Amino acid sequence: MENTTSNSEYLRGTLKTIVLSLLAENKRMYGYEITQAVKEQTNGEIALTFGALYPVLHKLEQEGALLTESLEVDGRLRKYYALTQQGAETARDKTIELGRFLNALQNLLGVPEPLPATS
Amino acid sequence: MENTTSNSEYLRGTLKTIVLSLLAENKRMYGYEITQAVKEQTNGEIALTFGALYPVLHKLEQEGALLTESLEVDGRLRKYYALTQQGAETARDKTIELGRFLNALQNLLGVPEPLPATS
DNA sequence: CTTGTATATATAAAAACCTTATATATATTT
DNA sequence: AAATATATATAAGGTTTTTATATATACAAG
């Protein structure tokens, strides 16, 4: 209900890393689950769209970062994605990289870092 | 020197807000100055390219968020950009919006919320 | 029993954005 | 004389994302 503003414009570029990061924490997830997890863990602040998510998942699979496993649950097909060993490394690297970027951006925007005492 | 890795991939979508935010802090700046300010204030972590920056500046001007003023300095033309009143409002809104997004993303990526004890 | 909502994956056209390459021009340093 | 720093700008190309659409089951509401 209420707001679904969802500043998806800022998502550009971070989606791949978000997916990798979630899979690093969860072992295996399916597409729909990923969108729900993001929505819940960000209190609705970030909402992934399927049109963006699935191409990313497919691409990561192509690149060898993910492996899939399809299971039928409640009569519906569920396609689970899990990191490969290579994908786990990529996830680590990209998450650190994005973390650095986020810090840099926060410093730039406002929230100043504690300055070392000026000599 | 050294690294110019510059994870520009994460910049997607945030560029406009970065520019607005800088102009909110500085009254007026020119393109080249903006790229230098970003580089310095982020310790080289974020590097804007001109091919991305100028189109954004022009678009913001078109939208009425910025006004320009050209001055000749040292025989070279310098085009200063400053926020309009409307642009100042946009800058405030977008900066807050991006701040919220960055917080949400940081929660999602790292610092996990305390898990309820698994039964 | 029919409609709507939630669950679930997927693709394709179009738009948006960014990268890379390029052009132009002056001042200063090597 | 050449390289580097300063300074703005555009265009082609590639990638990513949005929006719209298709398919399908389960369950609740009317």
Image: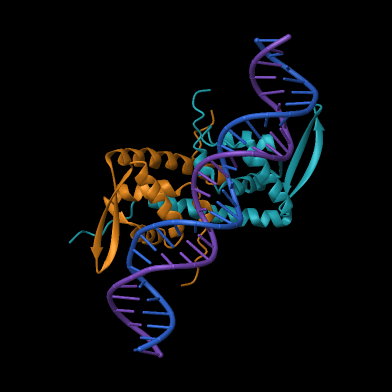
Chain colours: A orange, B cyan, C blue, D purple
Q: Quadrant of residue A49?
A: bottom left
Q: Quick check: B55 left or right of C25?
A: left
Considering depth in this image, is B109 or C22 the residue closer to the camera?
C22
The residue shown at (52%, 46%) is A111
Q: Quadrant of residue D25?
A: bottom left
Q: Is residue A48 visible?
A: no
Considering depth in this image, is D1 or B38 the residue closer to the camera?
D1
Q: Position of residue D4 (x, y in %)?
A: 64, 19
Q: Is residue B63 visible?
A: yes
The residue shown at (53%, 22%) is B1
The residue shown at (49%, 71%) is A2
**Vertical relation: A33 (above or below) A89:** below
**Vertical relation: A26 (above or below) A95:** below
Q: Position of residue C26 (x, y in %)?
A: 80, 23
Considering depth in this image, is B106 or B5 the residue closer to the camera?
B5
**Quadrant (top left/top right/bottom left/bottom right) for the C terminus of chain B:** bottom left
Considering depth in this image, is D17 or B12 the residue closer to the camera?
D17
Q: Position of residue A113 (x, y in %)?
A: 50, 40
Q: Quick check: A89 left or right of B86?
A: left
Q: How many marks?
A: 0
Q: Quick check: B66 left or right of B53?
A: right
